[in-house]
Every structure is written in C-alpha cells, then in structure tokens.
Image (cartoon, rainbow, N blue to C red):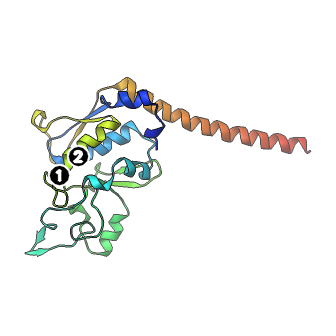
Amino acid sequence: MTFQKLSASQKQAIKKGVIEVESNTMNATALGVVAALLKIYPKLTFAELKEMLPDEINPGFDKFGNAMEGGKKYDSLFKPTGERLYGVIQPGSIREESLKRKLDITKSHFTGEGQTFNTSDGVEVLVSKKWQTKDAITGENDIQNLINHVEQYGVKVASFESQKTFKKGEYSLNVINANLLDVIQRQTDKKNLWWIFLIVMILVGFLLILISKQ
C-alpha cells in the first residue's frame, strides 16, 4: 500500500492533518473524505483504497431494513436485507449488478457528475450515501468512526456546526499542510521513476547484447 511505504516520522506528521474536509451533511462528508484521500495519495489502486476504508466502518445500508416504497420494503445488495457489508466505497461494477436486479443504485451511492472517482488502476469508485449515527448492526456512529479512522491518513473533518453554507452533496477540501502534501506526492512519483529507470536499463542491456552478437 502507498501509505505503508512512508517512513514512521512521515506517518506521525500525517496524523496532524494534511487536508481538511468541510461539509454540512454526513454523506457529503464521506464523499469529501474519499476525495481527500485520493488527493493525498493519487497513485492508490482500488484495492489499496478499499484496504484504507474497510467495509466494517459502515456495515449496514439502512437502519429500517432499507427504505420503503409504496408500503413495500425494497431489496438491496447490502445488509441488512442483502448479504454483503455496505461499506464506505464500492467499485463501479455494482452499477451493472444493480441494473440486473432492478435496483436503483442512486439510492445507495453517489453517482452524479463530479461525485464519482477513479483510482490509479482505472476502477470507478462509488461512495456510500447512507450514514447512521446509530448503526442498525453495530449501534455505533458510522460517520464518526470514519472521521476517526482517516485521521491516521492525514484527513481531518471540520465539525458540522462551524461550517459555511453548502448545497446538498457539496463539500470543500482545504489543504492544511501543503509542504507535507508535496512530500508525500513527490515520494510516490520517485518510486514510479525508479521503476521507469529500471525498465530503461534492462532495455539498454538487451540492446547491448544484441549489438555485441552482430
């Protein structure tokens, strides 16, 4: 994982905050948290991002056993009516899965313009919309668990009470340690350059062998 490659001193400094997320709703906060992580660690793969944000943070889709439509409970891919944990993020592949089961993906995840993301390996990232202050499965505050969890990665969340006015689903990202952000991003770039250098050296060696045989 990209984060695990950082030094112990860098990880300690990161806990003080790199980017702060502002919003006035729980689900927009979650959206901002994912955006902040991908800004700090732009080379993350989907598997790495998923490891950073385990599903256990937000296990159930809705405290009412999902919502009601026309007096009938509608189905879901996620607990408590589905089989899998709801989580913080899901891959874009659940779009097709939901379509096949005639489920409305917009009820469970952000899908609007500018509300989805892509990891470095090209996987679409969908962020969960439903956040409970008392989770139906664990009884815990899902959004607070997320806020506490991502502090280790440099993401801070401003308290809702102190927010400026936001429209529904909006958030803002404020860089609070630009120098550290630059260090993290440059370190990642250096690792990529090392691989490029290694590949070039292998190709040069291969060409020299071919030339020597002529």
Within 10 angstroms of label 1, few (less than 14), some, or many (20 or more) residues?
some
**Closer to the camera, 42 or 49?**
49
**Closer to the camera, 86 or 166?**
86
Q: What element carries label 2?
A: helix
Residue 122, how many percent across, how many down? 45, 53
Is residue 35 at all visible to an observer of this figure? yes
Q: In this view, does 93 lie above or below 48?
A: below
Residue 52, how many percent across, how many down? 37, 47
Q: Is residue 7 above or below residue 4?
A: above
Which residue does the numbered mark 2 point to in the structure image? 145
Q: Do the residues labelled 2 and 1 touch (CB within 8 Å)?
A: yes
Image quadrant of residue 72? bottom left
- Residue type at the position of mark 1: Glu
- The residue that appears at 18% across and 53% down in the rendered structure is 131
Q: In this view, does 11 lie above or below 120?
A: above
- The residue that appears at 21% across and 55% down in the rendered structure is 129
Is residue 127 at all visible to an observer of this figure? no
Which of disc 1 and disc 2 is earlier in sequence? 1
Residue 77, how many percent across, how many down? 28, 68
Which residue does the numbered mark 1 point to in the structure image? 140
Image quadrant of residue 58? bottom left
Q: CA gap, disc 2 to disc 1?
A: 8 Å
**Closer to the camera, 122 or 130?**
130
Within 10 angstroms of label 2, few (less than 14), some, or many (20 or more) residues?
some
- Residue type at the position of mark 2: Asn
Residue 92, how many percent across, how many down? 36, 60
Q: In which quarter of the image is the C terminus?
A: top right
Looking at the image, the residue that sits furthest to the right is 214
**Left or right of 165 on screen, residue 172:** right
Which numbered tag is attached to residue 67?
Answer: none
**Closer to the camera, 117 or 62?**
62
Looking at the image, the residue that sits furthest to the top is 179
